[in-house]
Image (cartoon, rainbow, N blue to C red):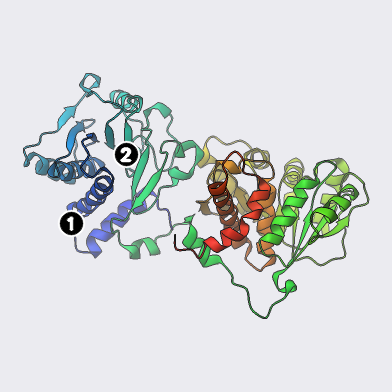
Amino acid sequence: MKILNAKQLKEADNYTIQNQGITSIELMERAASELFNWLHSRLQGANVKLHIFCGVGNNGGDGLALARMLVKEKYNVAVYIVNFSEQRSADFLVNYERLKEMNYWPEVIKESNDFPELAKEDIIVDAIFGQGLNRPPENWVANLIQYINQSKAFVVSVDIPSGLYMEAVPEDTSAVIQANHTLSFQLPKLPFFLPDTGIYSNNFEVLDIGLDMEYITQSDSSTYVIGKQEALEMYKPREKFSHKNTYGHVLVVGGSYGKIGAAMLSSEAALNSGAGLVTAYLPKCGYQIMQTALPEIMVLTSKHDEYISEIEFEVKPTVVAVGMGMDTKPVTKNAFRQFLEVNTLPLVIDADGLNILAQEQDLLEKLPSKTILTPHPGELKRLIGAWKDDFDKLAKVKAFSKAYDLIVVIKGAHSITVYHDALYINTTGNPGMATAGSGDTLTGIIAGLVAQQYTEVEAAVFGVYLHGKAGDLSVEKNSYQALTATEIIDFLGDAYLDLFSQA
């Protein structure tokens, strides 16, 4: 699913109106009908007070049309015009008149002493500002937003929480609606997925208002949301007449004294993701541990007992995953450097591999094209430097990706895979996955997919999806608190099977 910016969404509205032979007010009626159906299906005529706050633009017009439908169904509705401007959109005015024709007159709010009484048992519909907002609301409107947030009532925002921008982080964080639920028209919005802005809506849902799919399909967007359908389209089925070598060979390079578990998790995850063969390259202290714990994994060792002192092997892997638990001792740094000098294999780099790259950034020039990096926020900051906010972070990662031709997986609640200007936003995963070893499993999964001839971008995007889905399926039977990296691996098979489920 694509994500469009504010300009493109406005163009999509206009294209739909022209191509489908409808008026803008008819398109607004579609949007309001979807809002009404969502609310009505849940309230079923319940005697609850509904407060609808409408701005004077098209977002407010949506709110007024919704109010008319709710009043017609005898709901207990109070409607307020948030009069922040004397300029009103044409469609707002049409719906304002339609509401008055029902002998229903909205209250007009012009300043702080006009604020209505709100109870925590009420429902608030926020239709003050839409996606076109690009400046802070004036003081009394900011005060109204704070007043709504403090009411503790359940808040439903129309399209986007008021006060939130489409392509920037608000400077005044108190002047943004804290929505319990956002009903987004046709497509989700980028701010829903970023830590700095996603906090303003606990949940969101996309309502199909019939925007023209031809425009959306042809629109020049490089930002995508990855759900089950998108993941299924990437899936490669197995052939009947195949063998283990058909599905590639992953070499996992990592581990140090006390941290052999990191390499174990990556190795097991690579195997469970479908790789035909997996070899672990460890310091000598890890040999017996790995051979005992994971009999399916082949093991090679470095000369040093506690650290990797060289990376030399005679096997012929398809891909190398490197860095997990490896440490950054001088001898290990030197081994990593010497390996990169001669390596031509695809790479997936995590953990201490990333830390070494951050410390010795000339090594970035030695990475093969489309090397996959999987940093958590701290590792990312060491690689690219600090950022002002999430939009600045994305800009810096795009520039970094283009400069070195790398794929970067920004790990987080909605992990984002970045390749040049393209963003792939993941929709699986949960807070339970903030646990030791979770990143090691992701590295192994991605490497296992590269071994199976997925392109590097596909492997990163699909791997992030499977990793998150395995975590989601695990917590359904356990809990956030008890989720472990080993359980993520255990549920990888279920994540694959889920691709074909109808639920």
Q: Quadrant of the C terminus?
A: bottom left
Find residue 26 and report its image quarter. bottom left
Q: Quadrant of the N terminus?
A: bottom left
Find residue 457 and report its image quarter. bottom right
Q: Residue at x 15, y 44 (%)?
A: 73
Earlier in the chain: of badge 2 and badge 1, it is: 1
On the image, the x and y values in percent for residue 305 come to 92, 46
Mark 2 vs 1: CB contact within 8 A: no
Horizontal arrangement in the rendering, residue 419 relative to residue 303 (left or right): left
Task: Say whether residue 445 is visible.
Answer: yes
Find residue 345 and report its image quarter. bottom right
On the image, the x and y values in percent for residue 249 come to 75, 66
What residue occupies the far front of the structure in this picture?
477
Q: Secondary structure at mark 1?
A: loop
The residue type indicated by label 2 comes to Val
Horizontal arrangement in the rendering, residue 214 relative to residue 496 (left or right): left
On the image, the x and y values in percent for residue 237 come to 59, 72
Q: Residues within 10 Å of mark 2 (few under 14, many from 20)?
A: many
Q: Residue under circle 2?
A: 156
The residue type indicated by label 1 comes to Thr
Q: Residue under circle 1?
A: 23
